[in-house]
Amino acid sequence: MAITGVMRPGHCQLRVLDLDASITFYRDVMGLQFMGRDGRDRAFFKCLDERDHHSLILRQADRAGMDFYGFKVRDAATLARLDSDLRAYGISTERIPEGDLPETGERVRFQAPTGHQFELYWRKTDVGNHLGCRNPEAIIEGRKGISPVRLDHWQIHGADLDGSRDLFCDVLGFSLVERILGEDGKQDMAVWLTCSAKAHDIAFVRDERNDTLHHASYLLETWEQVLKAADVMTVHRVSIDIGPLRHGITRGTTIYAFDPSGNRFETFCGGYDFYPDMQPTVWTWDEVGRAIFYHTRELNERFLTVVT
C-alpha cells in the first residue's frame, strides 16, 4: 500500500513525576536509547530499531499523563495539505516552529474532539538504527532490558469518540479496523484505526474523562520476546496490570504494566495486516471481555478504571 499522507506514530511527550527515575526506567528497563536532555526539564529517547532522533519525550511535571501525540507525514506538501484540510473541517491549527523539539522540523498542532493534543510533522533527523543502510547485520547486539522495535500505537480516552473517529477517518485518511459496540448495538464504545497496513495506529475509547491516556504501546517481534519482557518486569519489580496473554481484537499478544509515574504502557506483538478494502471487525457488548483479553475472557478493574 502506498502511504502518501500520515505514515505512522512518530513521537509523544509523556509527563513524569521524577525525571531522573524515569530516565533510568526507560533506559535500563524498557531498553530505549537515551538521546539526551534539554534545558526545559525534558529527556529524549528512541527505540534501537528506530531511525529518527526520538520517539519518546519525557517531561518533568506534577501529574502523570500525555501532553501530545505526534504523527509523521510523508513530506512538506502533505503537511501543508493536511493543515489546510483540518482548517477547512473546522479544526483550529497552530504552527510550531522548527527547533522547538530537537532535530525536528515545523509541526502542525490541533486538538481532537476528545480533548487530546495532536501534531503532524514531516522532518526529523535520521540518526540511524545501529545497523546502517549498507550491508547491515540482521540483529543489534548488546540490547538491554525489554528493547522494543518501535513506538507502535496509543489507546486514549475521551467523551466525543465519534468526533475524533470521524476527524481521523474523514480528514487524516485513517481506516476503521475494529470496533466495540455498546449495549444498544449501535453506538461505538471503542474504535481501532490505522493509517498503514498495521492492525492499528491509534485506538479511541468512549470515556467522560477527556484528554486521558490509557497506554502507549511498544512493539516486540515475537511472543517469546513478550515473555522475556515479563521476566524483565519481574526482575525490576515493575507493576504489571495484566498479561502475558492475547487480545481478541487485533489478535496481538500483550503485557500491560506501569512506569514509575503510573503511566500505563504495553509491550505488544503480532496483529494482522489490514488493507482499506477489508470490512471492519465488529465486537458486540456481550463479548467485550473476550475481545480485549481473549484468554481470561474478562476485564480486570484496573484496566477499566486507571488512566492518566
Image: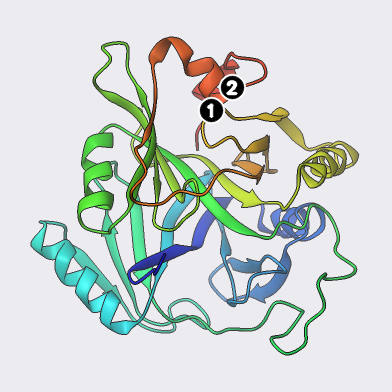
The residue pinned by badge 2 equals 302
Mark 2 falls on what kind of element? helix
Q: Is residue 273 left or right of residue 83?
A: right
Residue kind at label 2, given as amino acid type:
Arg
Residue kind at label 1, given as amino acid type:
Val
Residue 208 in view of the camera: no
Q: Nearer the viewer, residue 271 or 48?
A: 271
140 to 12, vertically: above or below: below
Residue at (73% x, 31% y) in the render: 240
The residue pinned by badge 1 equals 306
Q: Position of residue 28 (x, y in %)?
A: 82, 57
Q: Find out whether the residues at labels 1 and 2 contact each other: C-beta distance under 8 Å.
A: yes
Residue 27 in view of the camera: yes
Q: Position of residue 4 (x, y in %)?
A: 34, 72
Real-space Cα separation, disc 1 to disc 2, in angstroms: 5 Å
Q: Count residues near mark 2 (Cα–Cα under 10 Å), then give few for <14, some for 14-19, many for 20+.
A: few
308 to 57, vertically: above or below: above
Q: Position of residue 283 (x, y in %)?
A: 41, 22
